[in-house]
Amino acid sequence: MTEVKQETKAGDEMEDGAVLAALYEGKAMYTTPADAPLTYTFNEAANYAEQLNAQKYLGHDDWRVPTKGELAVLFRNRAAIGGFNVSGEVPAGWYCSASYLGYGYSWAQRFSDGRQDFDHHLGKHNDMSLRCVRG
């Protein structure tokens, strides 16, 4: 496991290539250095994270789609982390979460302004950007 040094801050690249996103609920949360290459539905995003785990991406097998709360952390630290799509356009300007609401909806966050939503164009069957997290 990558150890967080006292002087480490959000956006710093770790020795293994992961990026420190922040401390979340008292633990270090890491993110991939870039978005996943495509846009994904809710289920496709989960499958993509599983593929990262299967190949032990950056030496780890605990990558996952971020929760609604973890997306908010990524948004708050987006400038330090870098590489997010901040266009606000559907689908690429919205990021998917693992937080499922039921009735075909999942939470998503727009990185142009931080809006979190679950309305009709953001259902779990629609494509969105993805940035996986671990830790």
Image (tube, helix red, strand yellow):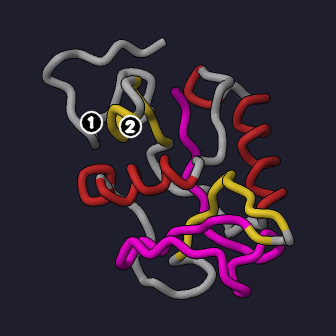
Q: Residue at x 68, y 52 (%)?
A: 98
- The residue under label 2 is which amino acid type? Val
Q: Nearer the viewer, residue 16 or 39?
A: 39
Mark linked to residue 19: 2
Task: Tell me, yes or no, whether the highlighted magenta stretch contains residue 55.
Answer: no
- Looking at the rendered structure, the secondary structure element under dot 1 is loop
Q: Which residues are magenta?
A: 106-135
Is 127 drawn above or below residue 46 in the view shown?
below
Image x and y of residue 17, in percent: 43, 31
Residue 124 placement, left or right of 76: right
**Do the residues under discs 2 and 1 have CB atoms within 8 angstroms?**
yes
Neighbor class of circle 2 (other Cα within 10 Å; few <14, some 14-19, many 20+) is many
Q: Residue at x 53, y 57 (%)?
A: 35
Task: Label the magenta part by its dominant secondary structure.
Answer: loop
Is 28 drawn above or below residue 81 in the view shown?
above
Sequence-wise first label, 2 or 1: 1
Image x and y of residue 77, in percent: 29, 52
Residue 43 placement, left or right of 16: right
Identify residue for label 1.
Answer: 12
Q: CA distance from mark 2 to mark 1?
A: 6 Å
Residue 100 placement, left or right of 133: right
Give residue 28's quadrant in the image.
top left
Q: Residue at x 37, y 21 (%)?
A: 15
Image x and y of residue 57, in percent: 63, 31
